[in-house]
Image: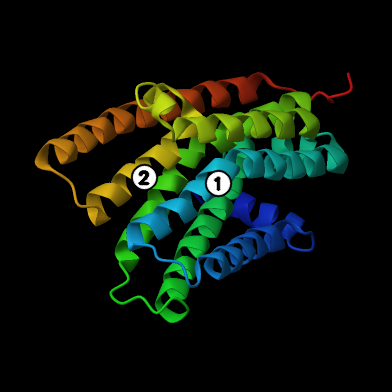
Amino acid sequence: MIGIWRFLYADYYKVKRTPYPWLHICLPLGWSIIYLLYMQGRQATILSLYSGYMEMLGIVLPLLSGIICGMVTMQEEQAGEFQNLFIRSRIKEIGYFSKLLFVWACGSLAIMLAAMLLGAGVSFLLKMDQVPYLTFVWGAIYLSIGSGILYMIQLWVSFTFGMGVSILLGGAGTLIAALMITSVGDLIWHYIPWGWGVRMMDSMALLQLGTLTSGMRAYLEHDMQTGWLWMISVTLLMLAIHLIWFRQWEGSKHTE
């Protein structure tokens, strides 16, 4: 456990003088300002405000994760062709796991910041009463949990093929995520990792803030249970596969 914290601190130290930390602050801040200014003077419910705001975050998250994972991977390659990940611990997999945990934690904090900025803006700028901050927090948590496998996929792609392919895949993931929130995704989103976070967040928001019939509520609850089953099992399986892969990986350059 101490080794993980040491790795995480080293990862932070590497990026603290780069644009990396500012991306995770400025992007949520900029998006909240743009969205709140757009919604000012418009008639909207808390549900529609929150869903529209968080859906857009969920849609762009695959692309952002592709960019972020590409950035940290390129830094590791330039610093020593990934060898720093191997020599800092006797357990080789810790290097990969700490890098994954670092990028996912940063992304999760940015999502939480975005949700809290929306809550503050709805209360103070849009003058809405009884803002459900707890629902906003849970929506951010759902979106963050669903993003874990995205960072996993993007980090593997970045290590294996480089930043360009990671961004390309992230862009494709954004298109898939946008498709998953439409009726097209109703029957298949459980099996599509790019749709997990945004669909789970949407269902949670509907259950907490929507006016639903008992039948619709039961359907959403069952739909979320299926989503949780697939999301947790596939994420854990993917993590195990990636750790096994990283044990065998030698850090070869993308240009080879």
Query: Of helix, strand and loop, which one carries label 2?
Result: helix
Is residue 121 in view? yes
**Looking at the picture, how far across and down is residue 190, in whole percent?**
37, 26
Q: Is residue 38 above or below residue 78?
A: below
Q: Is residue 12 above or below residue 124?
A: above
Taking depth in this image into account, of 238 and 6 the one nearest to the observer is 238
Q: Quadrant of residue 78?
A: top right
> Image check: 101 left or right of 141?
right
Amino acid bearing label 1 = Trp
Amino acid bearing label 2 = Asp
Residue at (18% x, 38% y) in the render: 216
Q: Is residue 147 above or below residue 48?
A: above
Is residue 91 in view? no
> Image check: 111 left or right of 96?
left
Q: Earlier in the sequence, mark 1 or mark 2?
A: 1
Query: Of helix, strand and loop, which one carries label 1?
Result: helix
Residue at (72% x, 56% y) in the render: 20
- Judging by the rendered image, the residue that carries numbered circle 1 is 104
Taking depth in this image into account, of 41 and 65 the one nearest to the observer is 41
Residue at (61% x, 52% y) in the render: 8
Taking depth in this image into account, of 208 and 239 the one nearest to the observer is 208
**Looking at the picture, how far across and down is residue 71, in whole percent?**
76, 44
Q: Quadrant of residue 80?
A: top right
Q: Tell me whether circle 1 and circle 2 mark residues in contact (CB < 8 Å).
A: no
- Judging by the rendered image, the residue that carries numbered circle 2 is 202
In this view, which residue lies farthest toward the left?
A: 214
**Looking at the picture, how far across and down is residue 199, in whole percent?**
39, 38
